[in-house]
Image (tube, rainbow, N blue to C red):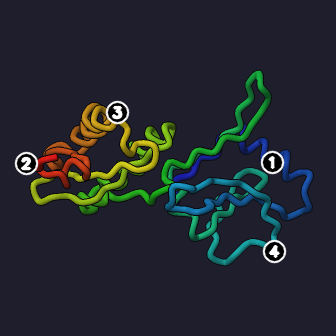
Amino acid sequence: MSNITITESAQTHFANLLGQQPEGTNIRIFVVNPGTQNAECGVSYCPAEAVEATDTEMPFTGFSAYIDELSLPFLDDAEIDYVTDKMGSQLTLKAPNAKMRKVSDDAPLIERVEYALQTQVNPQLASHGGHVSLVELTDDGVAIVAFGGGCNGCSMVDVTLKEGIEKELLQQFDGELTAVRDATEHDRGEHSYY
């Protein structure tokens, strides 16, 4: 069972919306492009005839939320809230695992590091149009990463890597990871001449 939270205010909002829909209409929560950088979480109406046998039903007061089989693992820890502020009201959807499936603590180190990069590091780099990916994990615990997008050739890359990414990962994978290096730096080798 995925751990999805629909707050009280969001439940009330859905119940009100569904009150204006044909009898038997519920909501569907889904992820488009799950497991990719373009993953988007969404909510739509789900008429009774659109319910699939493989859907997971989450019953709430006055309605049910249906989640398709494919989206389910990516909606783990998702939260749907209905927020009212001076700008008006809006539905907010947070799905921290939509871009990448949650990995278990006993997964191989490479998968856990990859997951940390995708879910923690890349969202921070995305604001600069950049992203980082794991190239390899050496036997002595060095994660070799490649920067792409806006980070490529940016002079701040070394600072970002050392101050941000390496610090964060070494803390998280204490005793498992020994260093994080940029693939380009790695390729040049220690003694290359320019």
2 or 4: tag closer to the N-terminus: 4
Cβ atoms at labels 1 and 4 below 8 Å apart: no
Place of residue 32 in the rendered image (x, y in percent of width and height, measured from the top left): 62, 61
**In the figure, 51 relative to 3: above or below?**
below
**Residue underneath mark 2:** 191
Q: Earlier in the sequence, mark 4 or mark 3?
A: 4
Q: Amino acid at mark 1?
A: Ala
Distance from disc 3 to disc 2, alpha carbons, whole Å, reads: 23 Å
Which residue is found at the position 83% from the left and 62% from the top? 25
Q: Residues within 10 Å of mark 2 (few under 14, many from 20)?
A: few
Q: Which amino acid, by three-letter code, is at mark 2?
A: His
In this rendering, which labeled residue sits more in front, label 3 or label 2?
Answer: 2
| SS class, disc 1 | helix
On residue 49, the disc is 4
Q: Nearer the viewer, mark 2 or mark 4?
A: 2
User: What residue is disc 3 on?
Assistant: 156
Disc marking residue 176: none
Mark 1–mark 4 distance (CA, rounded to whole Å): 19 Å
Q: Earlier in the sequence, mark 2 or mark 1?
A: 1
Mark 4 nearby-residue class (10 Å; few <14, some 14–19, many ≥20): few
Q: Position of residue 150 (x, y in %)?
A: 45, 43
| Cα–Cα span, label 2 and label 4 | 67 Å
Front-lying residue, 111 or 82: 111
